[in-house]
Amino acid sequence: MSHDWFSLDELAQHLGRDRREIEKLANRGRIPGRKVSGDWQFHPTEITHWLEQEMREYTDKELVLVEQTNRSVELNPQTPVASLLSVETCQVPLPARTKRSVLETLIEVAGRTWQIWQPAVLLNAIQEREAVLSTAFDNGVAIPHPRNPLPEAMGQSIIAFGRTESGIPFGAPNRGLTDLFFLVLCRDSRVHLHVLARLGRLIQQPGFLDQLRQVEDSAAAYELISSTEQLLPE
């Protein structure tokens, strides 16, 4: 494989999908790529951004496939979210009333691990990502993160969770309010996609979000997230 580009076959293998399906998507302009001397080439960063957006509409089965094709030794394969989350990186309630204060406070929460080296750099990158397209869903959940990994700004990959006391405007598609926030800070794209896929599966679990809105404190939030993740089928 080229250091900088996927071929059609390599991308199909990377995504775990049929080569003919990928070629059809590329020909229709549904997947970012370009032809060079008659052959399709795909840039890994563009593919990551495309897949990130596609995953918002994926079913559990499709999200499982993303997990399987992006496994990393950095994560526990059974509990990738819980392996990057801890009681100390959960904050319930999260004392924030604006989009910016949510992001600033979540970075402070993540910084309890002493693994955040450049908080201002991370905040700026997350805000730039939000300016392109909000990470809020229409169910009151948002998953803010930088557009690209920033390994120089942190020591280890981290997830921080916070629940505000009331919903705030965060850019959800239906203009609804957001009160559940998962800050995702990963050191590479594979870990990032694996985590997004697992979080996507979690928030699809019946009753999970309602329960998360009812927990009384940070420890209970972590326990609920961890125990729900353990019950997800492989």
Image: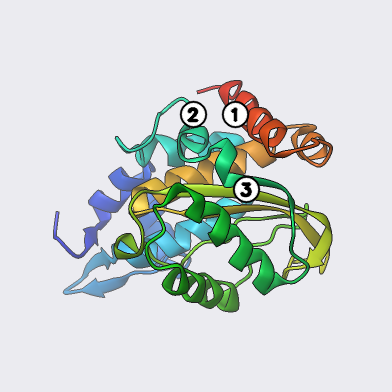
Q: Quadrant of residue 168?
A: bottom right
Within 10 Å of disc 3 (Cα), the crowding (few <14, some 14-19, many 20+) is many
- Image height of 123 relative to 88, above or below: below
Q: Which mark is residue 79?
A: 2
Q: Which element is circle 2 on?
A: loop
40 horizontally vs 186: left or right: left
Return the x and y of residue 7 as percentages of the image width and height. Answer: 22, 58
Q: Amino acid at mark 1?
A: Ser
Examine the rendering and report whether any part of residue 19 can be seen: no
Q: Amino acid at mark 2?
A: Thr
Name the residue that disc number 3 marks.
161
Q: Are marks 2 and 1 in contact (CB under 8 Å)?
A: yes
Q: Amino acid at mark 3?
A: Phe
Q: Earlier in the sequence, mark 2 or mark 3?
A: 2
203 horizontally vs 160: left or right: right
Cα distance between the residues tagged 2 and 3: 16 Å
